[in-house]
Image (cartoon, rainbow, N blue to C red):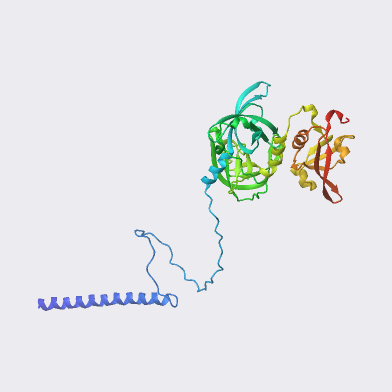
Amino acid sequence: MKVLKYTALFFCFVLIAGCAFFGVLHVLNSRDNTSEQSSPEGTKADTKTDKPAGDKNNTDPSPTPVSSFTIKEADRVNVQTVESVTINALAESALKSVVQINADVRTTDAWGRSQRGTSQGSGIILDKDEEALYIATNHHVIDGAEKITVTFPDGTEKAAVLRGSDAAGDLAILTIAADDLSDISSDSYAVASVNPESVVEVGDMVVALGNALGYGTSVTVGYVSATDREVATEEGELLLIQTDAAINPGNSGGALINLDGEVIGINSMKYSESFSRIEGMGFAIPISQALPILNELKQQKSFPAEEAGYLGVYITSVTSDMAQTFGWPKGVYVNTVTEGGAAAKAGILPGDIILSVNGIRVLNTSQLSARVTAYRAGSEITLVVSRENGDSRTELSIPVTLMEKESIPE
């Protein structure tokens, strides 16, 4: 009897376990069918994910299906291939026209005491003739110089003489006598390639060459950040090229060249302040603006200060605020004309705004005075003035014969 009892219990256990097993299978199949029915039409629920290997906590949602769309073929873009420029080859050629300048200067401190020092900068070989070699630099490089030494690319040093300097335009011309160059190979230096008609645009790549920190001539590369940037100096405002090519002390007077190897500017200054919060703001004098001044300085002959020419006017610089308020051009406003003076005889009137002297732009009183007194009394110069004409202004070209200061009536 016990055997029958245990056999009956075994079959009951097997029957119950089998029912439970088939019940579980039924539930799982029902869930799978429900999942397939809830997936979008025409798609199949995919249980795979793009989890990285080993990433077990990735809970990114599955991509959401989007409606179908048609991709249209875009118009083809024609790309013009630009001939590549090798900066080192470009610089190697241009560096022959850049020299190092060391000047022994004497300055005066705030208490009137005389001090000696050294000024380091750069220069550009601008021209050469039978008489001399002509080197352009900044006025502030040689201001107060008692002795000027030029170092050529091959390391040869020569004494230079100041031919002429213009503080208002921050420009100067040095000369080295042709006879002093006999021991230097003509292949070791070259006259710079200068094209005043070169167009300078924002975004142009440029290369700055100069004697940075007195370590020797160096090369930096950047872009033109702005043109005709008004920059205030001790002598007034200048219109300069702004660049992010590094320009450091010693670069002053060096060349800013384009990718054709042409000098487009003369490195002049940079913005700087404590903790170096300002970077990439260097400035160069546009060569188109500098050349007329440099050519005059090149031909300039020294004469006593009492023989300098004068206009006989009382003047004021046209500031940016004045230009914006009254709609005036930047230049020098004539407040009063001295009766019997050179300006009065030429027809200059109060209210005229002087724009240029012999084609050289003037932006302030310092520049105008420097331009005029560079000529002897009795010389004829040409002024371009802006004169009020009803609701507008007209530009006039007026020749003026300069007079000595003493001969102008008070």
- Counting the numbered discs, the total is 0
Q: Determine the image quadrant of residue 187.
A: top right
In the image, 7: left or right of 116? left
Task: State the residue in front, 365 or 398.
Answer: 398
* Image location (x, y in percent) of residue 188: 55, 37
* Image location (x, y in percent) of residue 382: 80, 41
Task: State the residue in front, 356 or 295.
Answer: 295
Furthest-top residue in view?
113
**Rendered-image quadrant of the C terminus:** top right
* Image location (x, y in percent) of residue 377: 82, 32
Q: Is residue 159 above or below residue 261?
A: above
Task: State the residue in front, 284 or 164.
Answer: 164
In the image, 231: left or right of 189? right
Q: Determine the image quadrant of residue 407.
A: top right
Q: Determine the image quadrant of residue 128.
A: top right
Residue plotted at (63% across, 40% down)? 266
**Rendered-image quadrant of the N terminus:** bottom left
Q: Is residue 184 above or below residue 50?
A: above
Task: State the residue in front, 89 or 42.
Answer: 89
* Image location (x, y in percent) of residue 159: 61, 28
